[in-house]
Image (spheres, rainbow, N blue to C red):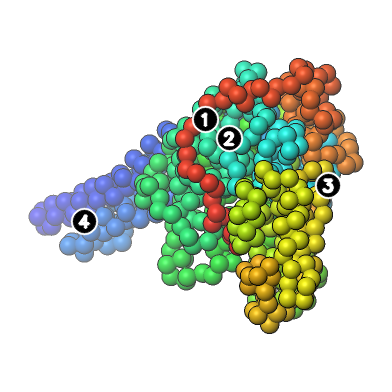
Amino acid sequence: MKRATQESGALKRAAVLGAVFGALPGFSLALWALWVNPWFLDRPVLYLGLAVFLPSVLLAFIGQLVGRTSSGKLGFSLLVLPLLSGGLVLRPIPEQAPVKMLVFGVDGATFDILDKGIADGELPAFAQVQGQGTHAVLQSMDPMFSPLLWTTMASGKTPEDHGVRGFHVQATAAKVPRIWDVAEAEGYSVGIYKWLVSYPPRPVDGFIVPAWLAPGPETWPMELSFVKELELSNRLKRKNVAARRSGLQLAVAGIPHGLRVGTLWEALRWKIRERLEHPDDDARFAALHRLRGQIDRDVFIHSLNNYNPDLATFSWFATDGLAHRFWKYHQPDSFEDVDTEKSMAYGDSLTDAYRQADSILSEILERVGPRTTVVILSDHGFKAMPDEQLQLVPLTDRLKARLEGELGPVQVSRLGIRLSVTAEQAPLHELERQLAMLIDDAGLPLYAWELLPGSSDTLGLVLADESPDPDRVASGRVGGEPLADFVKVEDEPFTGDHDPAGVFMAMGPGVPKGRDLGQVQMLDVGPTLQALMGIAPAQDLPGRILLGPQQRGPASRDTLVQGLEWGSGAAGVDEAALRALGYFD
């Protein structure tokens, strides 16, 4: 009897020890993660179940397996778990970050969706900014290409002045200072998260994480480069590049800089789904946008509190990418023969992106507090493209190669069924002469064009004959070359198109509440951002100061760019990302 009691006690002790040792790794990881990242345990029940309770049960079971332990003894042995894990639920969130101004960029956001979401109560953070501040329709500019537009807003200068004319540009091409350059020159620290044309990043007092055009993983400081490694190794099309580190290494690198349990869990679930289900491009496109948003939220909010920038910017691009691809399912009444199955699968993808943006904005607003001036911007709106079952789409690669052979460097970009062409060195009349030489078999010109408004050297091109005739495309010739090199018949075209009506909202100290400015211009944004930062805008900025002090500063600040020290990076831009969004072939 005594021996049996001793054996039972030994087995019980073995089970308790097994439970403790099973829980110890997960418990230790959580303690370390919470020490460096107070937001890590956003889903404590999930974490405790998978990383603490499950291993503990397993090792406790193994410890008692030989003794055929009853479930009651097993349960008793696990009473130690609440004692171990109770402290994990407590998250010592830091005080609010002392940000002077936050710029929240929502690429392609439209009031058509925002107003409905605000009215339905689904976008409370956007409603807060609109209700407690000032709003306006922000009139975009042609060509409506995001790198050009975001640089125009950041600098307050026209594309001809700031030097960013298309997609194949890097930050070193900017010939004038942007808002963060000006702010830093005035003694402010900056945190720039995925503003377009910010690669290569340069050393700043704060942080810079470049946007989706970046061809390499470089960030400032380099400890944030795991974000870009993850992005580049999971491109929206499958021309992936190998990450410098494994997925596990990137996760471990990301935990001290903001990655949360919920985000890591969603990433793991996606990887399992990819292996088991092999989802199509549409499913992959939607899922990666959402996952990327979670990663960006985690890292940006942690960086706000880690670096305490005076000026902080956060850019959200899912609203643009998903609108291009899924507008047909978002607004099915504007199209014929909408696939019912796909409409069920992707009909809410775009509105979900707005809801996710609102959730991120809400969390950021909690972190920055009421003393922060908040500005929300979109570079353009969105609308349905013409409903065509087949569409004749102009191609970019051969046209660019042909023009560059005669004129030198040329920017050629596509938006829907329109092209934008800029000859960087040749005069405009030479560009027009080369385009006029592209004549088809019937002796008719391939393109019709016009000078884009507000530009002296950029042409907007459309196909002179837009009839989607597959036989004509397959056999025809233009300018002595196959017509198929210049056009294609698209049977599943993108269904969302850029609209000129963008978004401007602002709230904060000194910003009037409930005010509607009507329609404002894109060139008004640059001087307004500077004024709201307490910086007198230069006299050579052509736009108006919409809000804030109205006085102007020096004649110009353009010489600031001459003293900038640029970091190193890869050449070019992320071509795969551009092609996934339809801007190039």
Using the image, determine if residue 485 lies above or below residue 499.
Answer: below
Please state which of residues 526 and 333 is positioned toward the viewer in this rendering: 526
Please state which of residues 150 and 464 is positioned toward the viewer in this rendering: 464
Among the two numbered marks 2 and 1 on one chain, the one whose residue lies closer to the N terminus: 2
Among the two numbered marks 4 and 2 on one chain, the one whose residue lies closer to the N terminus: 4
Q: In this view, does 394 lie to the left or right of 571?
A: right
Label 2: which residue?
Answer: 172
Instruction: Return the x and y of residue 317 as percentages of the image width and height.
Output: 64, 49
Which label sits in the foreground, 4 or 1? 1
The disc label shown at residue 541, or none:
none
The CA distance from mark 4 to mark 1 is 59 Å
- Three-letter amino acid code of the residue under disc 4: Gly
- Three-letter amino acid code of the residue under disc 2: Thr
Instruction: Return the x and y of residue 152 as percentages of the image width and height.
Output: 73, 38
Label 4: which residue?
Answer: 63
At mark 4, the secondary structure is helix
Q: In this view, does 181 lie to the left or right of 209?
A: right
Residue under the image location 54 percent in, 70 percent down: 280
Label 1: which residue?
Answer: 566
Callout 2 crowding tier (Cα within 10 Å): few <14, some 14–19, many ≥20: some
Which label sits in the foreground, 4 or 3? 3
The quarter of the rendered structure image containing the N terminus is: bottom left
Label 3: which residue?
Answer: 453
Marks 2 and 1 close (CB-CB < 8 Å): yes
